[in-house]
Image (spheres, grey):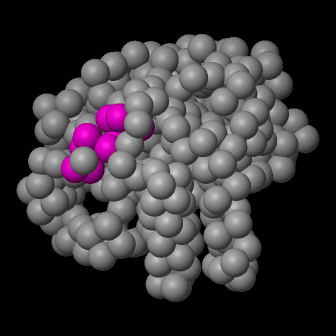
Amino acid sequence: MNKMERFHAAVAGEAVDRVPISLWLHFVTDYLDGAESARLHARFIRHYDWDLAKAISDYRCPLAEGMETLDSPRDMLRVKPKSMDRREFQEQFRLLRVLRADLGSDWPVIDTSFDPVQQITRLAGASRAAMIFENPKESHPMLEAATETVCRYVRELKRIGVDGVLYSTHGAISQPHPIGIDDTTFREFFRPYDIRVLEEMEGMVRILHPCLTHLDMDRIKDYPCEVVSWWDRGVGCPSMAEMRRKTDKCLMGGFDHMSVIERPLPDLRDEINDALDQVNGRGIILAPGCTIRSQVPERTLRCVRETVNAWSVQAAA
């Protein structure tokens, strides 16, 4: 199997020659142009032979000209849908085009995006989330604008020919997590906007990523997607086996991204083997629970690749 065949077989829950792996980290590249960022991505992806070329999105578009944060509810009304002609979007599109040209058509290219609330708080600051939820009259027009911007972005991804998108949402985070939300907040400020974006992504492989810990997966169980990616080792998160009982969709995860740098390699091997055993290596993309920290040593990344390869060989024997 080539990487594209392996990816789509895993997504469909079919047999694969070996379990596919995806792993990603930030290159802190927003000061570079998209072509240079793509070269950094391609070197990393090719060096470890990851099966998915997942691109990080480090180019962030301002809320509005001259706006650094949300100081009052009135500021939210200044946020409007963004043109895809802006440098921040154009450099990410260039990254994806160059990455595709570099790696070839048999290597799945996956982009990254975020729910509309995150589109705002990743710029304004997480502390501004309460202002959003407490002022619906002003915040809903802002979230409508952010949703339209993401949908415009997705349409361009389709024109480029991106194979899939990892879509991160904070909608499943429940209390007592510090940024956890209740069901009412989820239904008003996350679900309708998440659904619109995911429906816009139809035709690509939608990798739904309920982010962080204390996840209420029942909130997002009917979201339209092909793959579910989450921190299966996180506090208050379901295991691989528990998620397999909830859904027959492809699962993505398997090891703890937070502790992976310092932990002994035998422990990492045990964790990966345990995750693959839980689902018999079927319908799974082995991945960290979220982004790996950039200082991860090569020996750790080599261990991930070698462990998955060894498990796949043993399972096929």
Which residue is at the front of the view, 73 or 111? Answer: 111
- Expressed as whole percent of the image width and height from the top left, the position of residue 200 reads 34, 19
Which residue is at the front of the view, 247 or 309? Answer: 309
Which residue is at the front of the view, 283 or 203? Answer: 283
Please report the residue visible at 12 percent of the width from the left and 48 percent of the height from the top.
105
Residue 97 as seen in the image, left or right of residue 162: left
Q: Is residue 73 above or below residue 109?
A: above
Residue 137 as seen in the image, left or right of residue 291: right
- Expressed as whole percent of the image width and height from the top left, the position of residue 217 reads 72, 27
Tell me the magenta residue range: 2-10
Q: Is residue 47 above or below residue 279?
A: below
Q: Is residue 98 visible?
A: no
Residue 284 part of the magenta-drawn span? no
Residue 258 found in image quarter? bottom right
Please report the residue visible at 69 percent of the width from the left and 78 percent of the height from the top.
266
Residue 4 found in image quarter? top left
